[in-house]
Structure formats: C-alpha cells, structure tokens
C-alpha cells in the first residue's frame, strides 16, 4: 500500500509544481505590464536564494568533514597507530 501511495505521489508532484509556476508567471506578467517590477525582482531574489542554499549547506558540511578528517589523521597517524 505504501508503495502505491509513493508512486502516485511521485507522479502527482510535478503537476502541482507546473500549476504553481503558471500562476506565478501570470502574476509577474500582469505586474510588469502595469509597470510594477518590485514583485519580479523579489521573486528572482527568492529563486536565487532557494537555488544556492543547498549548495552552500553541502559545501559547509564538506569543509567541516575535510577539516575533521585532517585533524583526526594528524592525531592518529597515517597507518592508524597513535603518534608517540
């Protein structure tokens, strides 16, 4: 039963995203045609924020992991035995 629900949701989610994109696009076109560009600029900023946030988060985790592994490597040594 869970498998059926998961499969049906995986097919339904793209259609929900298309509907929201069309609504946003229509709203932006209406505002820009009336000379109001603040909403379009704010939406573009929000899109860029949502686009870069996961990459920044993954980069921070990768940096911390790398730093921890280097510190741990110096503490334990190359072969795995503690340094004397």
Image (cartoon, grey):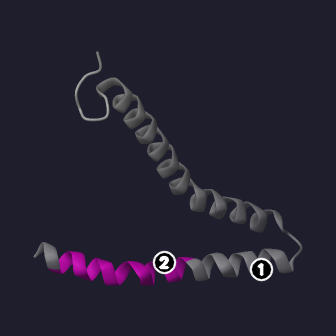
Q: Which residue: 23% across, 81% down?
A: 7
Q: Is residue 16 magenta?
A: yes
Real-space CA distance between mark 2 and mark 1, rounded to the nearest whole angstrom:
20 Å
Q: Nearer the viewer, residue 6 or 20?
A: 6
Can you name the residue that lies furthest to the right here? 35
Magenta span: 4-20
Q: What residue sits right under mark 2 in the picture? A: 17
Q: Position of 76 compared to 23: left or right?
A: left
Q: Quadrant of residue 35?
A: bottom right
Q: Which residue: 63% across, 64% down?
A: 47
Q: Nearer the viewer, residue 3 or 73?
A: 73
Q: Position of 23 compared to 16: left or right?
A: right
Can you name the residue that lies furthest to the left here? 1
Frontmost of labels 2 and 1 is 2
Q: Residues within 10 Å of mark 1 (few under 14, many from 20)?
A: few
Q: Which residue: 31% across, 34% down?
A: 78
Location of residue 67 with respect to 7 vertically, above or below = above
Q: Residues within 10 Å of mark 2 (few under 14, many from 20)?
A: few
Q: Which residue: 76% across, 80% down?
A: 29
Q: Position of 72 compared to 5: left or right?
A: right
Report the disc number at residue 48. none
Can you name the residue that lies furthest to the top here? 84
Location of residue 78 with respect to 60 vertically, above or below = above
Residue 55 % position (x, y): 53, 56
Q: Quadrant of residue 22?
A: bottom right
Q: What residue sits right under mark 1 in the picture? A: 30
Location of residue 36 with respect to 30 vertically, above or below = above
Name the magenta segment's main secondary structure: helix
Q: Secondary structure at mark 2?
A: helix
Q: Secondary structure at mark 1?
A: helix
Image quadrant where one finds the C terminus: top left
Image quadrant where one finds the N terminus: bottom left
């Amino acid at each position: 039963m869970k498998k059926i629900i998961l499969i049906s949701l995986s097919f339904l989610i793209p259609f929900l995203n298309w509907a929201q994109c069309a609504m946003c696009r229509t709203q932006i076109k209406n505002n820009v045609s009336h000379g109001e560009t603040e909403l379009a600029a704010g939406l573009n900023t929000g899109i860029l924020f949502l686009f870069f946030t996961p990459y920044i988060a993954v980069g921070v985790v990768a940096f911390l992991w790398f730093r921890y592994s280097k510190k741990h490597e110096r503490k334990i040594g190359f072969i795995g035995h503690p340094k004397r």
